Image: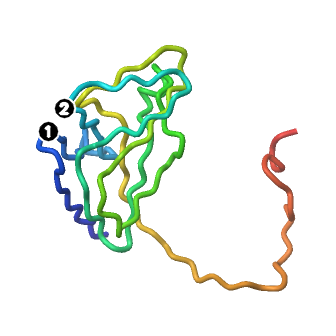
Amino acid sequence: MNQPFLRIKKLDPAASVPAYQSDQAAGLDLAACLPGGAVMIAPGQIVPVPCGFAMAIPAGFEAQVRPRSGLATRNGITMPNTPGTIDSDYRGQVIVPLINLGKERFEVTHGMRIAQMVIAPVSRAEVSEVESLDETARGGGGFGSTGLR
């Protein structure tokens, strides 16, 4: 499988370029670009945190932005839209919305790793409106219908 080539353009000289932290890491770490000072996130608050760069993702791929497990587990810091999708035709600044689900205020500082980004292939479906659908054993059973009682 060919590796996609991700082009990064720093919008702020203080921005960090996304990077893998180990040889087998699936996600590139994204860092906050806050050279002017830290941002406080109060419990229940959502704050968009800039990363200070834009990028060009190759056609046929997307970037999936996901929370970092350590921040979520230790501090309750996660993303309200996870995973967030960045389409290959987007060229604006990468911004990560963070939400504080913890009980204490949380300080995001410049250079702090705040999320991870996975580059994944995209399949586009051919959409067709039909009059009926094939039957299945599950049928119209909704959320939790295969295991919650």
What amino acid type is highlighted by mark number 2? Pro
Q: Which of the image's four quarters has the N terminus? A: bottom left
Which comes before the other along the chain, label 2 or label 1? 1
Q: Which mark is residue 35?
A: 2
Q: Which mark is residue 129?
A: none
Residue at far front of view: 36
Q: Position of residue 145 (x, y in %)?
A: 84, 49
Could you tell whether 103 is left or right of 5 in the image? right
Q: Nearer the viewer, residue 126 or 21?
A: 126
Q: Residue at x 81, y 50 (%)?
A: 146
Could you tell whether 122 is left or right of 17 in the image? right
| Category of crowding for the residue at label 1, using alpha-carbon neighbours closer than 10 angstroms: few (below 14), some (14–19), many (at least 20) | some
Residue at far top of view: 104
Count up the numbered dots: 2
Secondary structure of the residue carrying numbered label 1? loop
Q: Which of the image's four quarters has the C terminus? A: top right
Name the residue beneath numbered marker 1.
14
What amino acid type is highlighted by mark number 1? Ala
Q: Quadrant of residue 103?
A: top right
Q: Nearer the viewer, residue 91 or 26?
A: 91
142 relative to 89, above or below: above
118 relative to 73, above or below: below
Residue at far left of view: 13
Q: Position of residue 46 (x, y in %)?
A: 49, 34
Q: Residue at x 31, y 42 (%)?
A: 50
Q: CA distance from mark 2 to mark 1?
A: 7 Å
Q: Position of residue 129 (x, y in %)?
A: 73, 84
Secondary structure of the residue carrying numbered label 2? loop
96 relative to 108, above or below: below
Labelled pair 2, 1 in contact (Cβ < 8 Å): yes
